[in-house]
Amino acid sequence: MGLEYGPAFQGLLELWRGDTEALGRVRSPAAAPASPAYTLPPALLDACFQVVVGAFCSGDETTPWVPVEIGSLRLLRRPTGELWCEARLAPGRRLATRRSADLRLVDGAGAPIAEITGFVVQRLAGPAA
């Protein structure tokens, strides 16, 4: 979609899509700076946000979607290694420029890591320059 992601923000490894949901295998990229200040590393969170856009965007879309709002984030434990992120689009009206989803982040054994509700993405006015 015209956004340039450096190596620190390339944590989405695989993506599976349905009509109103997506499942992504994610990890904190090795190039992302490690910091004990972050319980949920920003690069990992960004990889999960990319799963949301994957739930409704086709591969030929050129106008980027960006995160603009989070209703709530519930962190159950610190993530480690590869994880799975499930994104489900909120039921109801889907605007052409704004979408909402809920996310669930689990480890390889299915144990919950985090839940994000009311995650909103918004389409930029035009293609990224």
Image (cartoon, helix red, strand yellow):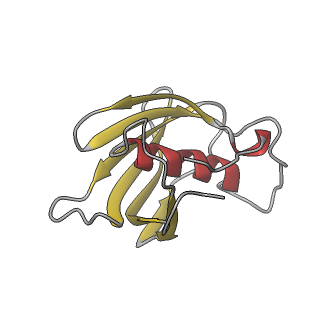
Residue 92 placement, left or right of 123: left
Does any portion of residue 41 appear in the rendered image?
A: no
Quadrant that contains the C terminus:
bottom right
Image coords of residue 54 (percent x, y): 41, 41
Image coords of residue 38 (percent x, y): 73, 59
Image coords of residue 91 (percent x, y): 17, 59
Residue 59 figure quarter: top left
Q: Looking at the image, is 8 positioned above or below residue 114?
A: above
Q: Residue at x 54, y 47 (%)?
A: 1
Q: Looking at the image, is 36 positioned above or below residue 32?
A: below
Q: Residue at x 33, y 46 (%)?
A: 56
Image coords of residue 32 (percent x, y): 80, 45
**Most extreme residue toward the left, as rendered?**
92
Q: Residue at x 48, y 65 (%)?
A: 73
Could you say which is closer to the camera, residue 79 or residue 119? 119
Does any portion of residue 34 appear in the rendered image?
A: yes
Q: Looking at the image, is 10 positioned above or below residue 96?
A: above
Could you say which is closer to the camera, residue 16 or residue 95? 95
Q: Residue at x 83, y 39 (%)?
A: 31
